[in-house]
Amino acid sequence: MIFASDLDQTLIYSERFLTDPSLKVRLIEKLDEKPISYMTERALCLLEEINKHMLFIPVTTRTIEQYNRITIFQNELKPKYAITSNGGNIICNGAVDEFWNKKIRMRIEDECISITDILKQFEDIKGSDWILNEKSAEDLFYYFIIDRQKMPTDEWDGFVQWMEHGNWTVSIQGRKLYFVPRAVNKRDAVLYVKSVEERSELFVAGDSLLDLPLVSCTSNCLIPSHGEIYHLAKRLEEGMSFPFTAQTGILASEEILEWVIEQMKIAK
């Protein structure tokens, strides 16, 4: 059995989600000595139990460097695999799977509009008033720090449609805007590990549009009742029959992990 889960706003949460002072939480990530991410103590205990009895794979849009800031995965749980860079990199026992990385870069070149063309087209609607910073994530995809209130609306929808026709995914998560080639996705990376490990059952969790390919590849999924997938399902009303948590925010992580443990018990 495999449990593959997104991290940010699925298992781990920023300070803005700590709305209940009675919750026991642990700081699991700092950047320049500033606290960044937390998990509840109960979620940590549940995840430790899962990691003992099945193959747990953290799956994240974070780069390798950003993933390595999460202390529990470096010092305590130490999962065998981690999928970073939205599926562009697979880490096995601390080493990058170079075969997989080269395969993904070849797919980007063969299947997707070039990033040069993307950025050139984006210049027409990009402005310093709403794009605050931009970065390349290991030359696999791009992301921007934005002011969402100042995003242009007239040109935006047409630009997104053009990108989608060119095999790119656009995702907005908080203050971050992602441009990601469809060749770089979490589903394909997880299924590759599943094949290598020769595991049969797969359980997954995720909250954003970048998690959509992953949660769509199995019926064994649970999605937090917040984030892009949840809000998209609410807008569409029909056509998206995903199971969602009863809890929202940081408590959704506990519900997801409790569900995985229950499935593990049933399998026994």
Image (cartoon, helix red, strand yellow):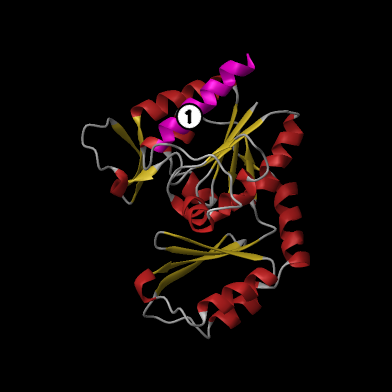
Q: Residue 186, position in %: x, y?
A: 63, 48
* Residue 29, image quadrant: top left
Evaluate whether residue 93 shows in this view.
no
Question: Looking at the image, which residue sits at the far front?
Answer: 238
Evaluate whether residue 255 shows in this view.
yes
Question: Looking at the image, which residue sits at the far top?
Answer: 268
Which residue is denoted by mark 1 in the rendering?
257
* Residue 189, image quadrant: top right
Q: Main secondary structure of the magenta part?
A: helix
* Residue 130, image quadrant: bottom left
Task: Relative to 54, say whether 217 is above or below.
Answer: below
Q: Amino acid at mark 1?
A: Leu
Q: Secondary structure at mark 1?
A: helix
Q: Residue at x 41, y 23 (%)?
A: 45
Q: Residue 262, position in %: x, y?
A: 53, 21
Residue 261: say if magenta.
yes
Q: Nearer the viewer, residue 136 or 235?
A: 235
Residue 249: say if magenta.
no
Task: Relative to 208, say whether 127 is above or below.
Answer: below
Task: Relative to 103, say whether 26 is above or below.
Answer: above
Q: Nearer the viewer, residue 50 or 67?
A: 50
- Give the residues drawn in magenta, as a range: 252-268
Q: Quadrant of the N terminus?
A: top right
Q: Residue at x 29, y 49 (%)?
A: 16
- Estimate how packed mark 1 is, as few (under 14), some (14 to 19) or many (20 or more) residues with alpha carbons within 10 Å: many
Q: Residue at x 63, y 18 (%)?
A: 267
